[in-house]
Amino acid sequence: TLTALMMETSRLRAGVLVSGNTYRHPAVLAKMAATLDHISRGRLILGLGAAWYEREHAAYGIPFPTTAERIHRLGEAAHLIKRLWTEPQVTFEGRFYRLQDAYCEPKPVQRPHPPILIGGGGEKLTLRVVAEHADQWNTFGSPEDFRRKIAILREHGRAVGRQTEEIEVSWAGVLHVTDSASEKAAVLQALAEAYGRPVEVVEPTVLVGSVEEIRERLRSYIAVGVTHFIGVLRPPFHLPSLRRFAEEIIPIVRAEYGRSLL
């Protein structure tokens, strides 16, 4: 799907949000990603995550380790992928993966390598992996959630000796633009039921409401350090909402902050 999308576009940067690390050996994924970076002429973002959907693993006979092990595997995989993209040959003896004189050719188009986006919000383990390996970090939550997690990310960065301010921070969540109070309430109620959480808990984490309400919410996220936004349209994919977002919100945000955040 991603290959087809890249073939039909010329400027769009694309990736998956995110590829579960348990599904492929990182050396195989590194080669697949390098090939896609060539097909797209340097427009790939490689999204990686520890994987979470246990039922899918059971359905296809894929081992599903503990949360801690999956996250440690993710860190080792990100390290290996970067090395395969940037070194002529890689020999590696890790806790989970082993390589002997492995290579990845041709190297990706992007230099030094395509950006690696790591998804997840776990404050003890996942954010440490983000601090060590990510070019971009994606999670969900309210502006206050991001304020707290970004502060923790900075602490991890100091611990591993990295300036984490260079990591792009992205929010992902449901987007729905509407001027109707009843429609807004219905969307929020549906989300609350889907997530199994109260409406008042869900509402601060999504972009649902009028143009001005969403603009203000974007400003709140930007104020705490979010640099990019990834809006999700839920079925039946309300295209007028997407059109209004493109025409009435993106230009204002771009004008205020001098660059695209979306």
Image: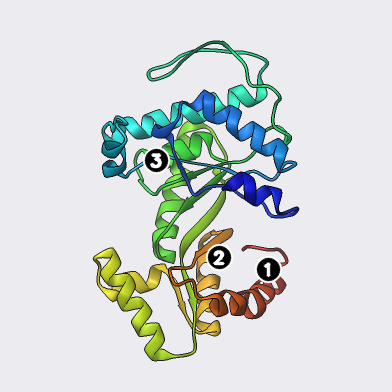
The local secondary structure at tag 2 comes to: helix
Extreme top residue here? Answer: 100
Q: Could you tell me how far apart the alpha carbons at marks 3 and 1 are, in whole angstroms?
A: 29 Å
Q: Which residue is denoted by mark 3 in the rendering? A: 126
Percent position (x, y) of residue 209?
Answer: 46, 81
The image quadrant that residue 236 belongs to is: bottom left
**What amino acid type should be assigned to the residue bearing mark 2?**
Ile
Between 256 and 190, the one lying in front of the other is: 190
Between 91 and 141, the one lying in front of the other is: 91
**What amino acid type should be assigned to the residue bearing mark 3?**
Thr
Q: Which residue is drawn at 45% across and 34% down?
A: 159
Q: Is the residue under label 1 in contact with that under label 3 (CB below 8 Å)?
A: no
Classify 217 as above or below 137: below
Which numbered disc, 2 or 1, marks the residue that appears first in the sequence?
A: 2
Q: Is the residue under label 1 in contact with that under label 2 (CB below 8 Å)?
A: yes
Between 160 and 8, the one lying in front of the other is: 8
* Residue 260 appearing in the image: yes
Question: Is 164 on the left or on the right of 194, as rendered?
Answer: right
Which numbered disc, 3 or 2, marks the residue that appears first in the sequence?
A: 3
* Residue 215 appearing in the image: no
| Image depth: mark 3 or mark 2 in front | 3
Q: Could you tell me how far apart the alpha carbons at marks 3 and 2 are, in whole angstroms?
A: 22 Å
> The C terminus appears in which quarter of the rendering?
bottom right
| Image depth: mark 3 or mark 1 in front | 3
Question: Is 41 on the left or on the right of 243, as rendered?
Answer: right
Q: Is the residue under label 2 in contact with that under label 3 (CB below 8 Å)?
A: no
Q: Which residue is denoted by mark 2 in the rendering? A: 222
